Amino acid sequence: MAAPLDLSVIIASYDTRDLLEANLRSIFEHPPRCSFEVIVSDDASHDGSPAMVRERFPMVVLRVNELNSGYARTNNRAIELARGRYLFLLNCDAVVKPGTLDVLVEFMDANPRAGCAGPLILNEDGSMQASVKALPSLRSAFVGKRSWIYRWFGDSPLVQRELLVTDVAPTTPPFQAGYVSSAAVIIPRAVADRVGEWDPKLWWFIDADYCKRIHDAGYEVWCVPSAQIVHMEHRGGTVRGRRRRFWAIYKFHQGAWIYFRRYSGYGLGHPLTWLVAVGAVARAALSAVIQVGKEILGREDRY
């Protein structure tokens, strides 16, 4: 049996050859001081991603899946192979800044009640992504990242209570959060075994669901701002193409409904359940109409 390691970096990949190569280079050009492995779980890419990994990164553990089965199943399969006492799930369209992995491992070692932790996630221009939030609530529908209130009043206290990185800097001390983005998150293997697999029914809200389960198991969720990645959001292969952009609208609202039904405590007969259902359908329809306009105008905005 192979010896255990400190850290398993797990990367789900689909048709992102160049992004994946940059991702892997960012890890191996500035490797962590701890013992580690990198696992790439590729979802039947057609762009030569597996061949690139075999040729340029032979030290990587490569799993090539037969189908593009989605984020949850792809990561669940990779976790089966992992030997690290910590699992670091990382999007393939992200670049790890030097020292980030060491900072996260050291933080987790010093905080045994931490069930997971996320770094700051930056855009390519250095601006902050809304990657650390309060757990979803009815308030999220009005002041979330996609809301008009966020666009118009992004610095308001109401928005800051929802999006927890509006006034955070790399020098900010670690702080507790409702949930952190699954684009980059470190989880103790013991916690992952207790909480269970990532839910394959979810695409959006999958990180909120997983962190809610971590909270419910008695652990804490943290953000560690001194650890940072750069995330080329939506440049991966999952939301490219017109059909996929409309599919994304459906999956977002489906995830919101599943999360509400799972954790709200309201039954199907409760008036609030029906109000949320009607609101979700109306919002999805409006989003689809807006997306039609974007497609006609030739804009490539992702949902």
Image (tube, grey):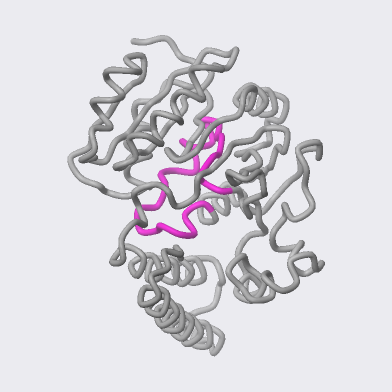
Q: Nearer the viewer, residue 220 or 170?
A: 170
Q: Quadrant of the N terminus?
A: top left
Residue drawn at point x = 26 percent, y = 41 percent: 43
Question: Is residue 199 on the magenta stretch?
Answer: yes
Q: Position of residue 286 (x, y in %)?
A: 46, 83
Horizontal side of 28 relative to 120 (left or right) equals left
- Location of residue 97 by image quarter: top right
Residue 150 at what x, y percent from top left?
68, 70
Residue at the (51%, 56%) spot, across then down: 209
Classify 66 as above or below 29.
Answer: below
Please indicate whether residue 187 sits to the left or right of residue 126 in the image.
Answer: left
Position of residue 256 in the picture relative to residue 298 (left or right): right
The residue range painted magenta reads 181-207
Determine which quarter of the picture holds residue 166.
Answer: bottom right
Decide: is 251 above or below 11. below
Whether residue 188 sits left or right of residue 193 in the image: it is right
